[in-house]
Each structure stands twice: as structure tokens, then as C-alpha cells.
Image (tube, rainbow, N blue to C red):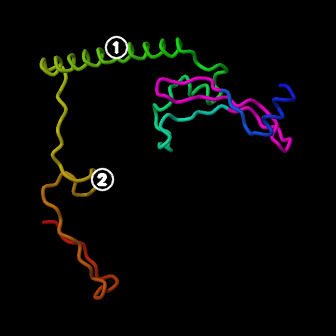
Amino acid sequence: MSRFTGLLRRTFGVVREHVGTDHLGNKYYFIPEQKSWTGRLVRAKRMVVAANPTEYEYMEGNIPMEWDAWIRGRRKEPPSVEELLKNESQREVIKLKAKEVEEKDLALQAKEYEEGLVATPARTVAKGHAASTSFGKQEISEDPTSTANTFQPGSWMPTSKK
């Protein structure tokens, strides 16, 4: 870096290089290592400017995987357009194959249920939670009553089962 460009960067602030733009409209920049106006060394950074600046939270899928890897420093070079298109087409092929396998699996399950090779899943009609004492019982016990004012220690007896 020449002295003149260094002087300009320190004078006018951070200069960032535009590296690329993804299909969603996000723009990616690289800020090279430089000295601040105070002489302090500022390390190199990678950043993204979102296409929709009103979104302040990152949502999955806002940044393509290849660009995310570049931003986080897991890859040295930013992804090329050819690489992005190739990976996207591979993802589409995988989605189609997964859909085909799922359809075959559902058809096989239906066939096995028809032939009686596999038992159909049982449907639970019990209400409540399995951890509760009344799970699966038809009648529910009466609500508890308080004996706070009349309780005498040692006087409680469990109710008899009917």
C-alpha cells in the first residue's frame, strides 16, 4: 500500500472493496488491514450489506452457504458465479431425489399395511399426560379441598378405594 492511499484511508475513514453480490441482492465487501488515524493497526474484515436493510435479525437462508463460509473465514476466496450456479443445481437434484425416495417409502409403507406385514399405529384415546396419576382412567378424581383452618396433626387418613 502506498503512503498516499494510506493517508487517504486514514483521512477519510475505512475504504472497502466490493467483492461480489449474491442472487438475493446482498453485497459483500472486504476491508483490508490498515492503520487508523490514531496509528493503531486495524485487522482485515469481511462484511455483508443486506439487500433488505429493515431486517435486523439474521434468518437462515438470507446468505447463501458459500458466501457465509467466506464471511466467517472458512474459505479464502469469495465464491464465483459458476460455483454458485453449480452448487444450486446440485441442491435441486438432491431435493428431487429426496422427494422420490420419500414417495417410494410412503408407497412401500402403504403396501405393507395392506398386506398386514406391519401393524397400523395405535391411536391413543386417553386424555391428559402420561405422567399424571389419572392417565387412561375414565373417571377423574374430585378436586382437592383445603383443611387449612381445621387441620390437626396426625388426624389425616387416606380415603378408601371404592
State the image coordinates of residue 101 (x, y, percent, origin top left): 30, 15
Q: Residue at x 53, y 15 (%)?
A: 81
Q: Residues within 10 Å of mark 2 (few under 14, many from 20)?
A: few
- Residue for badge 1: 97
In the figure, is residue 58 to the left or right of 147? right
Q: Residues within 10 Å of mark 1 (few under 14, many from 20)?
A: few
Q: Give the residue at x 86% y 41%.
A: 39
Q: Amino acid at mark 2?
A: Ala
Position in image of residue 51 (x %, y %): 49, 34
Q: Range of the magenta residues?
A: 18-45
Q: Residue at x 16, y 62 (%)?
A: 140
| Front residue of 56 and 70 | 56
Which residue carries the number 2 mark?
131
**Which x, y percent locates residue 46?**
65, 31
Determine which quarter of the picture holds residue 88: top left
Position of 133 with respect to 12 (left or right) is: left
Residue 84 drawn above or below residue 161? above
Q: CA distance from mark 2 to mark 1?
A: 41 Å
Nearer the observer, 96 or 142? 96
